[in-house]
Structure formats: structure tokens, C-alpha cells
Amino acid sequence: MKKNNKRESIIIAVILLVILAVAFYLDAKLPSYHIAIKVIKKAAVYSLVAVSMNLLNGFTGLFSLGQAGFMLLGAYAYAVLSIPVAKRAGVYQYFDGGIVKFSLPEVFSGFLGESVGSVVGMIVALMIGGLIAALVAYLIGLPVLRLKSDYLAIATLGFAEIVRAFFQWNALGPLTNGSNLLKSYPDLGGASSYLILIGIFIATILLLVNSTYGRAFKAIRDDEIAAEAMGINLAHHKRLAFIISSFFAGVGGGMLAMYMGTVQALSFKSTMTYEILLIVVIGGIGSISEQLLDTRADVTIGGGSKYFRQTVQGGEYKGKTVWEQAKEMGFQTVENDPAAMNALQYKDNQPVLALMSDGNMPTKFDPSKATAKDPAKDANPTVCTPNANWLGNQGSSLKDMTKKALDLLNDNPNGQKNGFFLQVEGASIDKQDHAGNACGQIGETDDFDQAIAYAMQNVDLTNTLVIVTADHAHTSQILNAQPAYALSTVLKTADGNNMVVSYGTAQDDSRDADGGYNGGDMEHTGTQLRIAASGPGAQRVIGLTDQTDNFYTIAGALGLATSTESQKALSDNGTVKVSAADGKFTADVDGFNGDAVLSYELKDKNDKTVAASDSSTPLSGVRVKTAQTTPIALDGVTEGSEYKLTVTGRQSGKAVTVDFQAPAANSADKNNGKPGAGNADKNGVIASGKVNNDTKAGPFGAALLGKTGTAVLAAAVAIAMLVAVAMLIKTAKAAKNDR
């Protein structure tokens, strides 16, 4: 065992050194704004925060959802302490330059030199951010850590939301800049710097986990009573784990601020915690391409075929490519072949996966460059030229893909009967705007417009809702003349006039040798978005609308669940079938459409748990396979024994209980894996059950009282019982005194 551990340690060390070497190479060869550098930086930051969260959730067994709040504290601390003095007036323009009048990198540069002092100052600012997060964790941990399970999660989630709202309060503006951005602070630089510093932090956490403190944390997680009996101070160690985890979350927040270039409290929503939790809890769920197959959409057409050449790392399809997995799952697959895509026909239970490009699809026009103000551009405007590689030349434009998707969905009997949802996205509009590529974004916008026009002309608007919008605003603006302080492109329009497109939100100067810009890091803006709609339900998207409301508008138009209760009701028809084959037992689960995760418990006739899912968090358990049967392997079943299986939807709370007896060896029920003998049906099913939706259950009936009424009644009965007990005790004491 020790040899294996040593071997694994060597392999991990080699892998880490290779990654670091690659990072150094990329830093030397690529500009800081390159997507590869950004991906490494963000991955490194999220790795640190995930490890810090795992210290609390995984090793100590405390389920906290407050990570986003602690990251916010660290991010703001770093930004406030690092903004150069000369730039504070511009950043805190509404608050007289703010109340902090120094910059730690500048302070340390004063006596350590600019290069060393700046780095030291940034690291000190990060550590202070971590210490602030740790101090806050200590204060809230005093009452909060007395709570357990879901209550701790709720309390820490509430803390994170309160902190986010608090930091946007204008009364704190001189410190936090209110609801405005904090910016202009320094960054460590390349991906290698991030990896080295974060590697040190993660190594520190690993040393802690393998120390006596780490063993105490794990003992508390496994059995608090046993841990306390061994002399472990539960309150002290829980608080310590909470504080350390929060410290590194704060440091991670500071480094995330470095990565983003700006800090705003609005960015640190609870969804950030959930993203990190998914890394910790469901890290093995598979790549996005695997999840796409698991979702099993009827039609998927687009780019990104290279992501389906990845090798599956675990599960049923381990060792195969995702593309091979798709074929084995019954998908109709087409790769980089427009003619084959257009020849596709609807086939029952054979979804379409047609990918026309390795990555992003070629744009309609060749790229243009944004440059600094130059009178020569007015005299010689840029003419957008068609791109010979554009897939529209081969019958695979966004319009063509939309047509094929509509044809396939209309040919589906289920689509004809129940309707369908189709999303069409012109993703490269955003990408070309980031790059300051006017011709690229105009061509992609035109391509998108053609797709919308086709859809509007070929659907029945009396029963079809069409919504057109975007997820955020962007940097480009159409001006009358070239701006003095921003990059721009002067285009020649179809009618022969000049049109100036301006770009002015890049964080770094990313111009190339000839002054052109295609850097890819123009930033988003906060401009309100246009949204338009036609068809039934269109009145719900007139004027200003919350983007999340679009979900309910679309769901309502399709007659789908639009409330929590109706979503839970989607699992009303849940079923479980227990099958026996080749000495193995499996529960096949269907119909839990209102759930994402299932839990199960298998007990024998003595009420002893034989097998159960990991249900330690709201996200753990058996993931529901959308539109497919979800199999659960029932390990530990003994032939001839009796069992009770309970399967529960974690979101809906709907449950199915199945009682069954495993076929006994050498009996009439035993069929050596062949279906149709004994009490098994022709498919090998030995028992089955479905969700019990009997609303009359209970002494008063759930239909009469509802869930809230039932809860109130239960509370009232409990109070009455306590009062009765108190009266009995009082009566007994009075009788004793009388004697």
C-alpha cells in the first residue's frame, strides 16, 4: 500500500510539474488576454475555493453555502487595498476618492523596489482579505455552528446574500464604491504565477488534512459521538475548520478579483457557491458533452465536434470517445458534412447530433480590425468581404440548421401533439464583438436575422411563441465620427456611405504591430437589452422584463410547469421496477420528471439497511437521466430473502416503495437470468411500484388541509401534548404537597 501511495505521489508531482511547465510556456508565447491563459487562471482560482469548501463539507461534514459571501469579502479587501493612489479619484468618482488613501503594492514598493514590492503588496492584500473572511467566519460561527445539516446551509446562504446586499449600500460607498465597480488594481500576471501561489495554498490545506487536526475533522464527520468520546473538542474543531475554510475562500475571492479585472458585489451571487459545490460534490458527473447526450435533446446541431472526441473517464462508456458513446446511445450522428445534415430524417427514439465544425463555425465575413483614430480610414473605409469558408456556402448556415431542426421536430409525432421548444443561438456575434471585429459581428448578426426570418415565415404564429433577445449588452457603438480615445473601424455600407463602429472597453492594450486590434477581451456593458416577441404570450415580454421570466413565459406557452408545486407534480407518475438477471438485481426508475436527483434505501425484513445512496447533501444521490430510464444497481441482495426498496425524488419528495423477494436458488422462481419463470414477468421484472398520490392519506386528509395546514396541525398537537404533560406534572406536585 505504501509503495502504491508513493507511486501515486510521484505521478501527481510529475503531472503538476508538466502543467506548470506548460503554463510557463504559454505565458511566454501568448498574450495575457488569450483564452488559454484565462481558462488556466479561472480553473486555478476555482480549484482553491473548491478545496477550501471540501475541507468543510467533505472532511468535517459541515454543509455550508456561504462561500460566495467569504469570496466577496476577500475580493473587496484585495481591490480596496491595491488600487493605485493616482487612480482612486477616478474609481471612487462619486465618493471623493474613497476613504482609503494608500495602496499596499505601492507601500511595499517604497522599500523593496517596484518589482518585488508590488508582488509582496499584492500577496499581503490577499492575506488580509483572507483574514477578514476568517474573522467574520469566527463571529458568525459562534451561533451558526450550533446548527446542523440543512439548517447550517440555510444560515450560511442567508449570510452570503446579506453580505452581497450590504456591500452595495451607498452609505459604505467611500469604502466599497456602493453599487459601482472597483477596478484599476494590479494583477499577478501570467497563468504560472496563479498556479504557483494557489499551489502553495492548496498544499497548505493538504498538509492540514493529513495532520492531527485533519484526522480530528474526519472523526467528527464520521461520528460526532465517538469523536467526543475520544476527547475531541467538537465546538473548537468545527469552528477551526469553518475559519480555515473561510480564510482560503477569502484568498480565492481576492484572486478571482485579479482574474476578473473588476469587482462588483452583484457578481457574487449564490449561484457562484453552487458552481463550486458542483465541483466538490458532482465532479465526476462527466463533461458538458457527456451531459448533453444524457439530456437527450431531440435535435442538436452546431459546432464543437472536437469536444466529442474526448475519452470518457468513467462509467458505462469508459475508454470510448463521447462520439462513440453517442452512437451507442442511439443518436443519428453527422460530423462536418452539410449534405448529410440536410439529408437527415426523423427516426423514432434516434435523436440527432450533427456537428458542422471542430470548434466555432467560420464567420460569414472575413475579419476586420479596430484601430486608433486615423483620417486615412475615412478616406479608405473597410469593405466587408465574404468568407470562402463560411458553411452557408455549403448549405449549412444558421438558417439552414434552423430549417432542418424545424423539419425534424415537426415530423416527430410527439412534437405535433405536444409542441416543442427550439433554441437558436448566434453565438459568434458575442465572440466577434469581444474581438473588436466589426465585419465578423455584422455578418453573424445577418446570419442570425436570416434564421429568425425563416422561423417567422414557417411557423404558425397563432400557436407559436417566438422570442428574440440576448444575454447581455456589448461594447460596440455606431458613431458619426472616429472617437479620439477608443479603437474603431470605418466601414463602407451598401449604399456607399461610411459607418463608424467604435470599441472602447478593453482592459489591456492588445493592439498588434500594425495597430490593429483583435484581442478578444473587449468587455460587456450594463446597457439594457432589446427583447421582442410574437405569438401567444408575447404580451409578457413587452417593456422591461427580468430575463429569468422568459423561462416561465416559454413554459407557459408550452403548457409546462411554471410553479414549484407544478414542477413537483411532474413526478406524480414515478415508477420503480425491480428486475433480476444473471444473479444481479436492478431497480429501473421512470417518471420522476420533476426531480434532478434520486435517493434510495434498501432494507431487509429485519429493517436493516442493506444498501443506500449517498444523500448527505441536497445534490448527492443518483442523478436522474432525463427522458431515459435511470438504473439503480441493488448490491447486497441475497437470493431468497425479502426486501423493501424506497426510492425518493430529492426535489419533489415523491417516493415509491417496492416490497420484493429475491428469487431463491434452485427454486421455481430461479431462472438463471432468463426472464419469464416463477414470479418474474417476461422482462425479468419481479416487483414494481408507483408514486402514491392518494390525497386522502392521514387522519384528516392532505387534500383538506394541504401541506401547510398539516404542518400547522402537527405543531398544534405537539404544543397541546406539551401543555398536557406540564399540567400532569403540576397536578402530581400539588398532590404530593397535599400529602
Image (cartoon, rainbow, N blue to C red):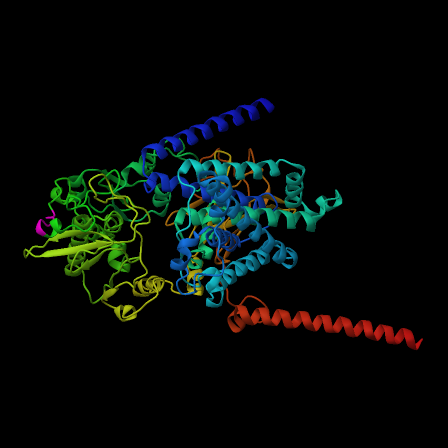
Q: Residue furthest bottom?
A: 738
Image-based side of 23 in relation to 738, left or right = left
Q: Nearer the viewer, residue 354 or 672?
A: 354
Q: Is residue 383 magenta?
A: yes
Percent across and percent down for residue 705 are 54, 72
Does residue 601 show up? no
**Residue at image x 65%, y 50%?**
239
Give me the residue at 40% from left, 61% from top: 180
Residue at the outermost right position: 739
Magenta stretch? 379-384
Q: Is residue 82 left or right of residue 290?
A: right
In the orientation shown, which residue stands out farthest toward the left? 496
> Residue 591, how many percent across, how many down?
42, 53
Residue ranking furthest to the top: 3
User: Relative to the observer, which residue lies in front, 64 or 658?
Assistant: 64
Which quadrant is the N terminus positioned in?
top right
Quarter holding the C terminus?
bottom right
Q: Give yes or no for residue 626 being in the magenta stretch.
A: no
Residue 618 lies left or right of residue 606; in this view the side is left
Considering depth in this image, is 576 or 499 the residue closer to the camera?
499
Q: Position of residue 701 (x, y in %)?
A: 55, 70
Mark yes or no: residue 246 visible: yes
* Image location of residue 608, percent across then percent down: 64, 45
Q: Quadrant of residue 181?
A: bottom left
Total label count? 0
Residue 531 higher or lower than 57, as above or below: below
In the displayed structure, 264 sits above or below 258; it is: below
Q: Main secondary structure of the magenta part?
A: loop
